[in-house]
Image (tube, helix red, strand yellow):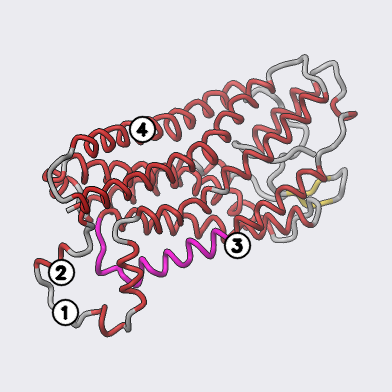
């Protein structure tokens, strides 16, 4: 039994057909089912707990302080919603692997639970890119930032991201649960056996499209933004030392958290997915290589799903004025909701000193 991977069912259907064409009988290879079930159930359980607690609390604070909204706040809010949707269906995956590959929750939930994981993956990448670009404009071009970065434009960008990612991830809705005749179990996240291998070339094209558009381009944009931010902070000499220090700390925190997320969650997953597709085209693979590749699929997919645990760190340590929002959130509702008049100073207050 093969674990799921980037293109879900289609990739492993192709892999099975390719293995049937090789001279080595892969059915004699030891199964990794026990390894798969233990790793997936454990990892998804941990991600669910930390993801729900961290993103749920962040979402609550962001909604309660929505009157202090800004463009950066809009991106944080959408990122938190994406993470909540993802971790809310992970318990279904945990139950599936705890039951040793038996799906008991219907065809619709099977499709949705696969779909939401990949929607969250690429929504996170694009929202992080938008947040990094917003921070870049605020620090490097503070005057132009007032016109370029607005709430309305941020909402339009978020809508475009949601529509694009949901549309391009729609293939994950194409196939749901099915009955495996050999084990008499209802399967999900795994391909029906016996499909042809004609689609490998198409899968290669889809992989490189998502690799370039969904990972490489956003990663390069983020790197360029952080290079510009670092250069601007090092060259800046005007203003008080306290303000400069606060701005540097906030920018450094954001750079570290986003880079760790990319290097730990997104990069291993995309590298392994590409290597795996090329591996499937080989006819001289050994059992040891097949098992190693299958285990790497399990590990990197868990790392990809763990991005939901890194995002709350982005809110708490580098989010625009998040700690001030948290202190406002703790006050009685009458103090923070509408007793003050909207003055110019109140309008600027949600912005941190380094972003004004």
Earlier-in-chain disc, 4 versus 2: 4
- Label 3, label 4: how many angstroms apart (C-alpha)? 31 Å
Earlier-in-chain disc, 2 versus 3: 3
- Residue 280 located left or right of residue 60: right
- Label 2, label 1: how many angstroms apart (C-alpha)? 9 Å
Q: Secondary structure at mark 1?
A: loop
Q: Mark 1 = which residue?
A: 340
Quarter of image, res 71 = bottom left
Quarter of image, res 328 = bottom left
- Assess whether residue 57 is covered by the magenta stretch: yes
Earlier-in-chain disc, 1 versus 3: 3
Q: Secondary structure at mark 3?
A: helix
Residue beneath the point at 46% across and 52% down: 311
| In the image, farthest residue toward the front | 241
- Label 2, label 3: how many angstroms apart (C-alpha)? 37 Å
**Along the line of sight, the residue nearer the viewer: 178 or 188:** 188
- In the depicted structure, whether residue 256 falls above or below residue 15: below
Q: Mark 2 = which residue?
A: 346
Q: Looking at the picture, how far across and down is residue 152, in whole percent?
A: 22, 54
- Residue 223's disc is 4
Bounds of the magenta segment? 50-70
- Assess whether residue 262 is covered by the magenta stretch: no
Could you classify mark 3 by the number of other residues whose Cα lies within 10 Å: few (under 14), some (14-19), or many (20 or more)? some
Q: Mark 3 = which residue?
A: 49
Q: Mark 2 and mark 1 in contact? Answer it, CB < 8 Å.
A: yes
- Label 1, label 3: how many angstroms apart (C-alpha)? 38 Å
Residue beneath the point at 16% across and 51% down: 240
């Amino acid at each position: 039994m093969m674990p799921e991977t980037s293109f879900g069912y289609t990739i492993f259907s192709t892999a099975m057909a390719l293995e049937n064409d090789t001279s080595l009988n892969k059915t004699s290879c030891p199964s990794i089912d026990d390894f798969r079930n233990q790793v997936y159930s454990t990892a998804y359980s941990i991600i669910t707990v930390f993801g729900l607690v961290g993103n749920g609390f962040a979402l609550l604070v962001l909604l309660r302080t929505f009157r202090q909204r800004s463009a950066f706040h809009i991106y944080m809010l959408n990122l938190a919603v994406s993470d909540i949707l993802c971790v809310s269906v992970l318990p279904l995956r945990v139950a599936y692997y705890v039951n040793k590959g038996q799906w008991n929750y219907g065809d619709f939930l099977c499709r949705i639970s696969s779909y939401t994981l990949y929607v969250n993956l690429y929504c996170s990448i694009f929202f992080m890119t938008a947040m990094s670009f917003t921070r870049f404009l605020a620090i490097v071009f503070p005057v132009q930032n007032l016109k370029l970065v607005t709430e309305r434009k941020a909402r339009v960008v978020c809508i475009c991201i949601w529509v694009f990612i949901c549309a391009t991830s729609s293939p994950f809705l194409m196939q749901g649960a099915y009955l495996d005749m050999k084990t008499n179990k209802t399967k999900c996240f795994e391909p029906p056996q016996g499909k042809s291998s004609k689609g490998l070339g198409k899968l290669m094209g889809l992989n490189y499209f998502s690799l370039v558009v969904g990972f490489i381009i956003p990663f390069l944009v983020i790197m360029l933004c952080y290079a510009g931010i670092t250069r601007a902070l090092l060259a800046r000499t005007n203003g008080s030392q306290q303000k400069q220090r606060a701005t540097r700390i906030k920018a450094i925190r954001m750079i570290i958290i986003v880079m760790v997320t990319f290097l730990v969650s997104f990069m291993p997953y995309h590298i392994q997915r590409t290597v795996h597709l090329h591996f499937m085209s080989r006819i001289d693979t050994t059992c040891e290589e097949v098992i190693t590749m299958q285990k790497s699929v399990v590990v990197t997919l868990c790392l990809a799903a763990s991005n939901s645990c890194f995002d709350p760190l982005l809110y708490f340590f580098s989010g625009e004025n998040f700690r001030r929002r948290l202190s406002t959130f703790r006050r009685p509702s009458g103090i923070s909701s509408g007793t003050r008049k909207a003055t110019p100073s109140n309008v600027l207050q949600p912005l941190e000193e380094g972003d004004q």
